[in-house]
Image (cartoon, grey):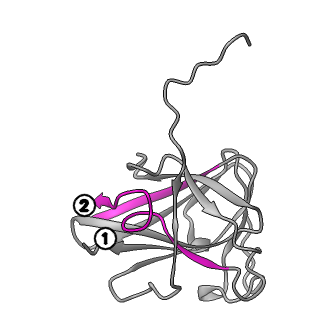
């Protein structure tokens, strides 16, 4: 290779750690282990294998480098929504591309998830993070009423454990 030219290089979007109490009556909860499709490196789901998981399970060994998971959910009405995730990462961090219905929403082309100090086997190792809106660097996602598919694709070789995802109406 003689030369490499980057036309555009955007930094990864940052997430914001939030209190672990976002689950509310208007939040759409998507259990990590309830993915409907996957590709690349096999992920693992073993009920009871991790500490303090919602519903008693999580998806783990979700490695990067093109591996992906996809979930389906339904929103009750058209509007702006914020995305959250409860994650554990014993690495220094992990990167994921987030797609909604096959498209990458603004700011989710590369999302930097933080290292949380462990893989979810002890107190404090699960962090709830906001991917869009307010303190996150990506804007809320516009969704129409009905069924949607959310996909995360790994970048590089870092693992990310997912307890759950949340889709919450955006509060202005």
Q: Quadrant of the N terminus?
A: top right
Q: Which mark is residue 144?
A: 2
Magenta residues, start to end: 126-154
Which residue is tagged 1? 75
Label 1: state its secondary structure.
Answer: strand
Q: Which mark is residue 63?
A: none
Q: Confirm or deny contact between disc 1 and disc 2 (CB under 8 A).
A: yes
The picture places residue 5, in percent across and down from the top left corner, at 58, 19
Q: Is residue 14 above or below residue 121?
A: above
Asked if one can make out residue 145 in the rendered structure from this viewpoint, the answer is no
Q: Is residue 149 above or below residue 168?
A: above
The residue lying at 46 percent from left, 59 percent from top is 150
Asked if one can make out residue 125 in the rendered structure from this viewpoint, the answer is yes
- Whether residue 147 is in magenta: the answer is yes
The image quadrant that residue 119 belongs to is bottom right
Side of 38 relative to 123 (left or right): left
* 149 vs 86, nearest the viewer: 86
**Residue sitting farthest toward the left:** 78
* 107 vs 143, nearest the viewer: 107
Q: Is residue 61 above or below residue 3?
A: below
Q: Quadrant of the C terminus?
A: bottom left
Cα separation, mark 1 vs mark 2, equals: 7 Å
């Amino acid at each position: 290779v003689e030369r490499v030219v980057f036309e555009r290089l955007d930094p990864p979007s940052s997430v914001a750690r939030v209190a672990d109490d976002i689950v509310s009556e208007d939040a759409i909860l998507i259990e990590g282990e309830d993915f409907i499709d996957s590709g690349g490196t096999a992920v693992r789901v073993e009920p009871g294998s991790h500490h303090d998981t919602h519903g008693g399970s999580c998806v783990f060994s979700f490695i990067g480098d093109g591996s992906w998971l996809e979930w389906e959910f339904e929103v009750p009405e058209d509007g702006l929504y914020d995305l959250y995730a409860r994650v554990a990462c014993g690495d220094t961090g992990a990167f994921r591309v987030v797609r909604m219905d096959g498209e990458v929403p603004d700011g989710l082309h590369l999302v930097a998830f933080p290292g949380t100090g462990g893989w979810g086997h002890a107190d404090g190792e699960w962090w709830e993070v906001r991917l869009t809106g307010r303190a996150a660097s990506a804007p809320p996602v516009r969704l129409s009423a009905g069924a949607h598919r959310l996909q995360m694709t790994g970048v590089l070789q870092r693992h990310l454990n997912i307890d759950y995802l949340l889709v919450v109406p955006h509060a202005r």
